[in-house]
Image (cartoon, rainbow, N blue to C red):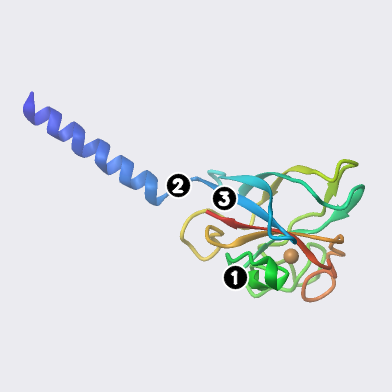
Amino acid sequence: MKRLLSITFATVAALTSAMAQDKQTAQANFVGADGKDNGRATLTAAAAGGVLIELEVSGLPANKWVAFHVHETGKCDAATHHESAGKHFNPTKAEHGLLAAKGPHAGDMPNQYVGQDGVLRAQVFDGMVTLDGKENGIRGRALMIHENSDDYRSQPAGDAGARLACAVIK
Ligand SMILES: [Cu+2]
């Protein structure tokens, strides 16, 4: 009995450690252009690859399509207008744009619509990224919402304008 118990504990410990290393969910808290908290996202990795991103962000321009991307650096500093987050996440060195001939960046996602209340509520699936530690993993990188829509073609970032909300993926 004693031996069985110690095996069970060892198994639980091994499983717990495996789950911590290969966590299939992540969280991200948005920081607005003014440096204040303005929303959050929950990310869930899909078994076949790709990540579902569920988000709610407030204080955005109402009745407008806005660009939504993964940027390469997980640093959201409003004092730099969130330039701290760097360029789009682009591990395959593709061109920018979901509709570009040599695109897209792994961090390119479709524009999202902000309602009358200035709140963006969306569920977006990016099939080009993961939450694991591999080359296309986005944990430790940043989600970004822009002032304007992405034209899906202009280099290097779709002419999407100012960075209004930034969230480090944890
Ligand atoms: Cu962007």
Horizontal arrangement in the rendering, residue 170 relative to residue 122 (left or right): left
Tally of numbered discs: 3
Q: Is residue 85 above or below residue 126?
A: below
Amino acid identity at mark 3: Gly
- The numbered dot on residue 49 is 3
Q: Are marks 2 and 1 in contact (CB under 8 Å)?
A: no
Which one is nearer the viewer's eye here, 76 or 154? 76
Q: Position of residue 16 (x, y in %)?
A: 32, 41
Q: Are marks 1 and 3 in contact (CB under 8 Å)?
A: no
Distance (Cα) linking label 1 and label 3? 16 Å
Q: Is mark 1 within 8 Å of ligand 1?
A: no
Q: Residue furthest top?
A: 1
Horizontal arrangement in the rendering, residue 59 relative to residue 12 (left or right): right
Badge 1 density bin: few <14, some 14–19, many ≥20, Cα 10 Å: some
Which badge, 3 or 2, comes first in the chain's sequence? 2
Tell which tag, 3 or 2, sits nearer the viewer: 2
Residue located beneath label 2 in the image: 23
Which badge, 1 or 3, comes first in the chain's sequence? 3
- The numbered dot on residue 123 is none
Residue located beneath label 1 in the image: 91
Amino acid identity at mark 1: Pro
Horizontal arrangement in the rendering, residue 69 relative to residue 115 (left or right): left
Tell which tag, 1 or 3, sits nearer the viewer: 1
Q: Is residue 57 above or below residue 97?
A: above
Q: Residue furthest left?
A: 2
Q: Position of residue 124 (x, y in %)?
A: 71, 46
Badge 2 density bin: few <14, some 14–19, many ≥20, Cα 10 Å: few
Q: Is mark 3 within 8 Å of ligand 1?
A: no
Q: Quadrant of ligand 1?
A: bottom right
Mark 1 lies on a secondary structure that is loop
